[in-house]
Image: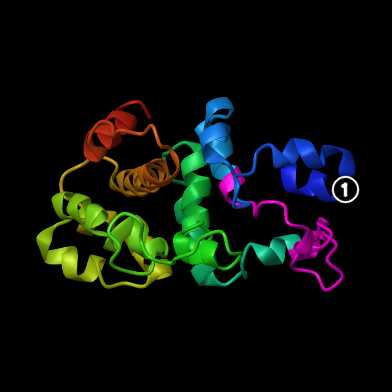
Amino acid sequence: MKLGFQLIQDDTVDSCVADWLSFSGGWDWSRLKQVLPIGVLHRIAAIPPPNASFGTDLPCWRWEHKQLFTTRSGYASLGNSSCHSSKVWKLIWTLSVPQRIRTFVWLAVHGKLLTNQERMRPHLSTTASCSLCNNASEDVLHVLRDCVRARTIWFQVIHRRKLADFNSLPLHEWFTCALSKSDDYFKDVDDKAAKFAIICWILWNRRNKCLFDVDYKGSEPILVECSRMLAIL
């Protein structure tokens, strides 16, 4: 998505980009949703609207002092080589799920999902609160576990004797334990680690549709969708 980038580099597109801004200077979602699919709208939501006060928009690599990409810094950005990181890496990339879900889980483990808490940093949101329950600052754990909508789902699939432990772990440990000890946590199901990953993925996608798709009116129950996906893996 290069709308903001083109605005700074080429004055000839100023009017074109301005056509997609609202009167207040934000993205005009009512117009954008008429011509773009929901996936592209999600990407646009992560980009601040063009604003001359931001200065020139240039590509850079945040993990190098000179802001230029190197292979060494690329590997370093993925995390250190400790046994802890290595363990969760293997757990994720050996999951029997589509590649897009493995990638999603990897981002979630490292807190890289664009929750409202994260969107506050680049001023993409005016509040860090959960837009679904309005009860807490929305971080990754809140979306995938602590929001009342998520807790309702986990209550149905996690053994009651394990719920207290399941609901108390910090982010990295939560994913590691749920993926490596899924037999201990989950009730009867064939591929429990895959079910955990798929439920997380569906929760995140439902959250995004509720927030960014004005035409979204709900769909099949989350556990029904999960079972359907597991059946075709």
Q: Tell me the residue at 73%/40% (across/down).
A: 17
Q: Main secondary structure of the magenta part?
A: loop
Left or right: where 129 falls relative to 1: left
Crowd rating for badge 1 (residues with CA inside 10 Å; few <14, some 14–19, many 20+): few
User: Magenta segment, which residues?
Assistant: 44-73
Percent x, y of residue 148: 22, 58
Left or right: where 205 falls relative to 217: right
Q: Residue furthest left?
A: 160
**In the picture shown, does residue 199 fall above or below 176?**
above
Q: Is residue 45 magenta?
A: yes
User: On the rendered image, what quadrant is the N terminus found in?
Assistant: top right
In front of the other: 111 or 127: 127
Percent x, y of residue 174: 35, 65
**Residue 10 lies in what quarter of the image?**
top right
Q: Residue furthest front?
A: 23
Q: Tell me the residue at 75%/66% (across/down).
A: 62
**Residue 147 lies in what quarter of the image?**
bottom left
Element type at mark 1: helix
Under mark 1, the amino acid is: Gln
Whether residue 127 is visible to the viewer of this picture, yes or no, is: yes
Q: Tell me the residue at 88%/44% (across/down).
A: 11
Percent x, y of residue 13: 82, 38
In front of the other: 9 or 98: 9
Q: Is residue 47 magenta?
A: yes
**In the picture shown, does residue 128 fall above or below 95?**
below
In front of the other: 173 or 11: 11
Q: Tell me the residue at 39%/48% (across/down).
A: 204
Q: Which residue is mark 1?
A: 9
Left or right: where 141 falls relative to 32: left
User: On the rendered image, what quadrant is the C terminus found in?
Assistant: top left
